[in-house]
């Protein structure tokens, strides 16, 4: 059981073990989709009153924007927000496969093992999640694993999971059925108009979310945390600043694929803005958790 207040901050790399694309992979996939001339895909856009000429303009601007993530691009090109959200939803939904979550397991399985407790005490684990990802894989894994581990019904498991803060600061691909009676199932429906539209409606481009309520909730969790871990995070300067990290504190994070100069710049960003020290480890998420994180058991 995790007894100390612990916050995990997730970036795209945290979902990569479960086949979801990284930021730049998502950009490239979206560009290919909207220019593919695939009749089924094009119907999704035309049904939302989006013209082929608008798709071409969007694809061209995205390709030459130099941005590593679609949300960074849309924050400044607000005229493309509706196209962009539908494109994000259409691409990411295809990776919703529960069998992959459990066949792979990876760090979700590892964390679930650390949350070990009686069913009644499960939500007493002092864990919170702040995610920059749109996908719903982490909460779906927790819900399904809890249900099958203890033989409880959906309502009982939903109550436990809903007591664990999981904040999607950029929104998510719609609520799950156990979160909302009108929620969308965790399933590949990437050519289903209603499913894609519902998923797109749950996405927030930060320009739209002027009150930054999700970030304020995240900041409260961070101020209360004893342990902060960045998993699969890209350390984009804007995203780091929006978290408003606690001053005179420290954290740990993965830095898989980053070079020494890049890591030094990230550490300087944390230190200069918040007097916050971050230890960066070059390992993938699961290895980082197993080798660098001592959970309070």
Image (cartoon, rainbow, N blue to C red):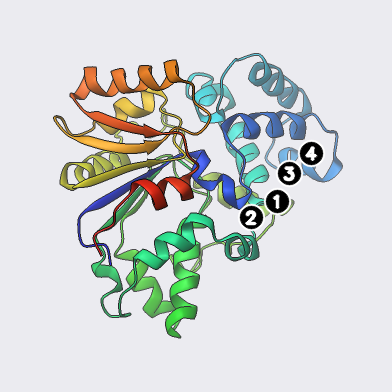
Q: CA distance from mark 4 to mark 2?
A: 15 Å
**Vertical relation: 290 (above or below) 247:** below
Q: Which residue is mark 2?
A: 195
Provide the secondary structure element on which disc 3 rests: helix
Q: Secondary structure at mark 2?
A: helix
Residue with the mark numbered 4:
42
**Mark 1 neighbour class, 10 Å CA radius: few under 14, some 14 to 19, many 20 or more:** many
Q: Are marks 4 and 3 in contact (CB under 8 Å)?
A: yes
Please say if the residues under marks 1 and 3 sit with CB atoms less than 8 Å apart: no
Q: Quadrant of the N terminus?
A: bottom left
Mark 1 lies on residue = 190
Q: Position of residue 53 (x, y in %)?
A: 76, 22
Earlier residue among tags 1 and 2: 1
Up/down of 64 relative to 279, above or below? above
Q: Gap between marks 2 and 3, in whole Å?
A: 10 Å
Tell me the residue that label 3 is attached to.
Answer: 44
Comes first in the chain, label 4 or label 1: 4
Q: How far, Cα to Cα, is label 4 from label 1?
A: 12 Å
Q: Tell me where residue 171 sits by quadrant.
A: top left
Circle 1/circle 2 CB separation < 8 Å:
yes
Q: Earlier in the sequence, mark 2 or mark 3?
A: 3
Q: Quadrant of residue 278?
A: top left
Q: Residues within 10 Å of mark 4 (few under 14, many from 20)?
A: some
- For the residues labelled 1 and 2, the Cα–Cα distance comes to 7 Å
Q: Quick one: 144 or 248, which is closer to the camera?
A: 248
Tell which tag, 4 or 1, sits nearer the viewer. 1
First-in-chain label (1 vs 3): 3
Of badges 1 and 2, nearer the viewer stands: 1
Residue 248: in sight, yes or no? yes
């Amino acid at each position: 059981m995790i007894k100390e207040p612990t916050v995990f901050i997730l970036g795209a790399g945290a979902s990569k073990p479960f086949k979801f694309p990284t930021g730049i992979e998502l950009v490239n996939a979206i560009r290919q989709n909207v220019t593919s001339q695939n009749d089924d895909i094009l119907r999704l856009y035309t049904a939302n009153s989006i013209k082929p000429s608008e798709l071409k303009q969007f694809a061209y601007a995205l390709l030459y924007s130099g941005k590593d993530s679609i949300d960074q691009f849309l924050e400044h090109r607000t005229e493309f927000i509706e196209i962009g959200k539908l494109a994000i939803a259409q691409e990411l939904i295809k990776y919703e496969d529960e069998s992959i979550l459990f066949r792979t397991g990876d760090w979700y399985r590892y964390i679930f093992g650390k949350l070990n407790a009686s069913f009644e005490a499960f939500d007493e684990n002092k864990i919170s999640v702040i995610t920059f990802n749109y996908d719903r894989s982490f909460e779906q894994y927790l819900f399904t694993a809890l249900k099958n581990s203890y033989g409880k019904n959906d309502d009982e498991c939903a109550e436990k999971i809903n007591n664990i803060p999981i904040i999607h600061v950029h929104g998510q691909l719609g609520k799950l059925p156990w979160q909302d009676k009108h929620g969308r199932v965790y399933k590949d429906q990437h050519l289903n108009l209603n499913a894609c539209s519902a998923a797109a409606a749950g996405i927030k481009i930060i320009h739209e979310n002027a009150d930054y309520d999700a970030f304020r909730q995240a900041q409260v969790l961070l101020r209360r945390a004893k342990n902060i871990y960045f998993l699969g995070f890209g350390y984009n300067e804007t995203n780091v600043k929006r978290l408003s990290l606690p001053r005179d504190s420290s954290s740990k994070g993965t830095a898989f694929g980053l070079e020494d100069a890049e890591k030094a710049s990230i550490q300087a960003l944390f230190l200069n803005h918040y007097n916050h020290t971050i230890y960066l480890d070059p390992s993938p998420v699961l290895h980082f958790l197993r080798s660098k994180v001592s959970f309070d058991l």
